Image (cartoon, rainbow, N blue to C red):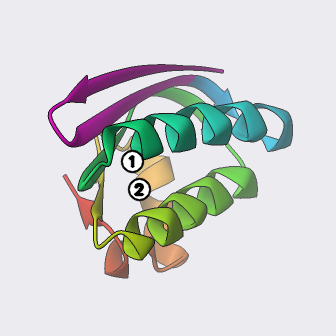
Amino acid sequence: MAVEIRIQDDVVQAYLSGEIDHHSAVQIREKIDESVIQASASRLILDFALVTFMDSSGIGLVMGRFRLMQETGGTVVLQNLPSPIRKVMKLAGLDKLAEFR
């Protein structure tokens, strides 16, 4: 699993790729959180276009980032969700916490 971070003004974009599981989620979380804090981000965009597998750790990853952004009044956007991942995210109720694109 890899994450590429792009920061523009106060928007952090995290491009995820590969598999999101218990082990990779920890590293992804740390990298995203560090970037959000450094940028004083008002918006976090998580791009799932290149994610090939995700277990419940992916849901936890999104929920934790939502809480982080909520603390600063920011928002979370989930974009380019592959159909199976979109379905799991909706079942978990994440569509009520984050904007889906």
Numbered tag placed on residue 86 in the rendering: 2
Using the image as rendered, state which of residue 88 and residue 60 is in the foreground. Answer: 60
The amino acid type of the residue labelled 2 equals: Arg
Q: Which residues are magenta?
A: 1-17
Q: At 73% across and 53% down in the image, what residue appears?
A: 57
The amino acid type of the residue labelled 1 equals: Ser
Quadrant holding the N terminus: top right
Residue 86 placement: quadrant: bottom left
Q: Is residue 79 above or below residue 74?
A: above
Q: Are marks 1 and 2 in contact (CB under 8 Å)?
A: yes
Residue identifier under label 1 = 83
For label 2, count other residues whose C-alpha is less than 10 Å away and answer few (under 14), some (14-19) or many (20+). some
Q: Is residue 4 above or below residue 91?
A: above
Q: At 51% across and 71% down in the image, what residue appears?
A: 67
Give the overall secondary structure of the magenta segment: strand
In this rendering, position of residue 80 left or right of residue 91: left
Mark 2 secondary-structure assignment: helix
Using the image as rendered, state which of residue 23 and residue 37 is in the foreground. Answer: 37
